Image: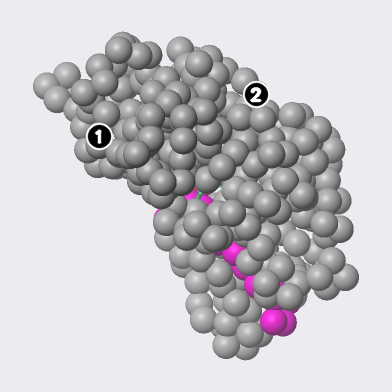
């Protein structure tokens, strides 16, 4: 038996509870991990509250990511004592996840804990931070340089947004942070934003094409925000879309794509191949300022995770939440 959050669905409805979990609940896997730290990402908020059908098998341990130590392994790449990190692969959705003290997973899903980070730091980055890095890599691959102009980051106070700002600023880009919480402007500037804008400027239905402003965009919001961001991206610029915090829809026209050669990159962290993950973690180790990471991170205990998940979905959480699972 070990401690963790378990989501059940039955006569009592959809229920997430902290409880003792029997080992038999865990699915098959060739590596067992003693989880030290996990996190709360937006998707964990959806899973724990049941607000969206993220969980597709019951009972389920939520938690789309974790860091910990291998305790059993029949996988060639891993031995007892190895420090590992997991992000995605349906963990916390279809396969029991990180918000419990023990996880049993496929060894193919794990990456080594980067030497630059402690387990806590790796989870302060978590899936949100690793996704922010994937977005930055997409803009870089597109060839966008700091001299090309401003980079817009939407959902700026969120986990992806906060890490994206810190990374872009360190790399020399001029970042404009779009937020619904202007009161957090000082925090966003501390992370590296050159300017902060009210997200209301982007969230209403806009024109098919507008004045060119952004060399690149990292969008975590979707819906009209993403459409307006595309419509105001400069000629040959690029938009990396990874989120739907404002809505799943995309009420846009083709105008920015066919008149300005704008490129829209879809960013997926869940099924990203191992080589992409390793590159993202390597770049996080090089390009993320750990003092900024600490400034954006709030630490909670496992018994607080259910309440904080609801706060996260209400947009009340700033930056990243790291969960002490041990
Ligand atoms: P957070 O909850 O930490 O941040 C989301 C932020 O979006 C909020 O802090 C808020 O920022 C903004 N926001 C919230 N509601 C609205 C709204 N109705 N309209 C406009 N803005 C809003 O989430 P994460 O950073 O963890 O994730 C962000 C998004 O990215 C989520 O949709 C998540 O599912 C997605 N994601 C996708 C991944 C992928 O693989 N594609 C991986 C990781 C995350 P502010 O207060 O500054 O306005």
x, y percentage for residue 222? 51, 57
- Mark 2, mark 1: which one is toward the viewer? 1
Q: Residue furthest left?
A: 11
Q: Is residue 244 magenta?
A: yes
Q: Would you place residue 116 above or below residue 120 in this image?
A: below
Q: Is residue 70 magenta?
A: no
The residue located at (21%, 32%) in the rendering is 58
Position of 276 compared to 18: left or right? Answer: right
Which numbered disc covers residue 184?
none
The residue located at (59%, 48%) in the rendering is 130
Q: Earlier in the sequence, mark 2 or mark 1?
A: 1
User: Who is closer to the viewer here, 36 or 229?
Assistant: 36
Say what secondary structure mark 1 lies in: loop
x, y percentage for residue 310? 45, 26
Q: Would you place residue 268 above or below residue 292 in this image?
A: below
Alpha carbon distance from label 2 to label 1:
30 Å
Q: Would you place residue 117 above or below residue 287 in this image?
A: above
| Residue receiving disc 1 | 27
Which quadrant of the rendered structure holds the N terminus? top left
Crowding around mark 2 (Cα neighbors within 10 Å: few <14, some 14 to 19, many 20+) is some
| Residue receiving disc 2 | 298
Position of 1 compared to 300: left or right? Answer: left
């Amino acid at each position: 038996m070990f401690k963790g959050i378990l989501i059940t669905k039955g006569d009592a409805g959809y229920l997430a509870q902290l409880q003792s979990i029997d080992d038999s609940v865990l699915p098959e896997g060739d590596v067992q991990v003693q989880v030290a730290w996990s996190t709360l990402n937006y998707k964990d908020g959806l899973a724990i509250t049941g607000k969206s059908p993220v969980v597709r098998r019951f009972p389920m341990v939520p938690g789309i990511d974790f860091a910990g130590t291998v305790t059993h392994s029949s996988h060639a790449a891993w031995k007892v004592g190895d420090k590992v990190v997991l992000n995605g692969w349906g963990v916390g959705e279809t396969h029991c996840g990180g918000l419990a003290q023990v996880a049993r997973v496929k060894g193919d899903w794990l990456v080594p804990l980067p030497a630059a980070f402690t387990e806590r730091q790796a989870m302060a980055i978590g899936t949100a931070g690793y996704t922010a890095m994937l977005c930055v890599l997409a803009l870089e691959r597109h060839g966008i340089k700091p001299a090309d102009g401003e980079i817009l980051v939407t959902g700026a106070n969120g986990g992806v947004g906060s890490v994206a700002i810190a990374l872009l600023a360190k790399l020399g880009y001029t970042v404009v942070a779009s937020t619904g919480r202007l009161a957090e402007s000082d925090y966003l500037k501390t992370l590296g934003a050159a300017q902060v804008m009210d997200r209301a400027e982007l969230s209403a239905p806009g024109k098919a094409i507008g004045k060119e402003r952004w060399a690149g965009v990292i969008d975590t919001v979707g819906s009209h925000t993403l459409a307006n961001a595309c419509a105001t991206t400069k000629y040959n610029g690029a938009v990396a879309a990874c989120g739907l915090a404002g809505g799943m829809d995309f009420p846009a026209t083709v105008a920015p794509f066919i008149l300005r050669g704008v490129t829209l990159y879809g960013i997926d962290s869940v099924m990203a191949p191992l080589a992409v993950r390793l590159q993202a973690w390597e770049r996080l180790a090089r390009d993320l300022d750990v003092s900024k990471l600490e400034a954006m991170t709030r630490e909670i205990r496992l018994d607080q995770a259910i309440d904080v998940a609801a706060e996260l979905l209400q947009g009340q959480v700033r930056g990243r939440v790291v969960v002490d699972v041990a």
